[in-house]
Image (spheres, rainbow, N blue to C red):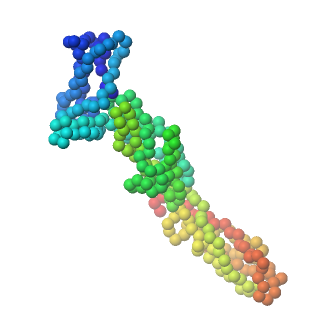
Amino acid sequence: MFTLADARATGFGPSGWKTSTFDLASVFAADIREGRSLILGFAVINDEANQRPSTLLLDNVRLNAPVAANAELVRSDGAGAFLTYRSNPVAATDVIGTSASETVSIAPSDLLANDKASAGANSITFRDLAEPAETGSGDPPTRGIVRSDGFGISYDPAGQYIGLSEGEVGFDRFTYSITDANGWGRPREVRVEITGVNDAPTTVLDASVANEDGEAVTIAVLANDDDPDSDDDGSTLRLISAEAASGATVTLDSIVGGILTYDPGDRFQELSAGQTPRTPSPIRSRIGMERERPGR
């Protein structure tokens, strides 16, 4: 849509014919030879309404030379004599942030705040996500889950960044497209910055056997546990405390390695030879993590 000078304000040309000249470098944001212009002519049929300025909608503008610009070539005669372009809106890259455990929402109006309508268009609107909104889509793939309901967009890390240590930053991306009176632009990227949090350790049940009035047994309770924030050998895990539900003696031998000693003592005197308790005698333990700093 181009805004033309109002005939009532500027006077009529011969036979009511008016022309308006537009600089192509300005209209199409084009990198072309200086001084190339587009001249539009139109006849004033009736201008009784006091519109200042009048508007004229053009749906087909032909230029007889290639334009290196934010314009899409939609038609060519094959010989390059007549090329038809459509000016596209410009969408700038956006950046949003969230933690590895939280979903973030963003309004389409926030994404459009730094975008620009094409020449002659009065406004732009959010069109849609430009790729399938699911984990693993796109190139490179979007690792989280992106959804749009037309009113808002949500991004869910979906557990894909649980391996980030506390304070460490990971990155993801998704793309969207916009539309205006002239068409829509190419997909633009939204960059997502995900900050790691201190996640709870993943523990696995341990089992060991001890004899009544027998020797104490040593158990490595951290050997099969995991720190989801670390890709090392589990050295960030710490055994904080442990106690036996039966009242047997439990001694912490190594906090870092997670080694404890279990001594049944005289707590199972009621058992006959070869008998075992009807229910296992659990050891309740607390496991913590040494916080791993980014870059460590």
Question: Can residue 218 be seen here?
Answer: yes
Q: Tell me which residue sits at (39%, 37%) in the image.
A: 179
* Residue 262 percent location from the top left of the image: 70, 78
Q: For residue 235, which quarter of the picture?
A: bottom right
Question: Can residue 265 be seen here?
Answer: no
Is residue 118 positioned above or below 250 on the image? above
Q: Tell me which residue sits at (32%, 26%) in the image.
A: 57
- Asked whether 247 or 205 is in front, the reply is 205
Q: For residue 11, which quarter of the picture?
A: top left
For this orientation, the residue located farthest to the right is 270
- Asked whether 195 or 147 is in front, the reply is 147
Q: Tell me which residue sits at (44%, 45%) in the image.
A: 129
The quarter of the image holding the N terminus is top left
Residue 183 horizontal side relative to residue 216, left or right: left
Q: For residue 200, which quarter of the picture?
A: bottom right
Q: Tell me which residue sits at (54%, 63%) in the image.
A: 228
* Residue 116 percent location from the top left of the image: 37, 34
For this orientation, the residue located farthest to the bottom is 273
Residue 136 horizontal side relative to residue 101, left or right: left
* Residue 37 percent location from the top left of the image: 21, 28
Is residue 127 positioned above or below 226 on the image? above
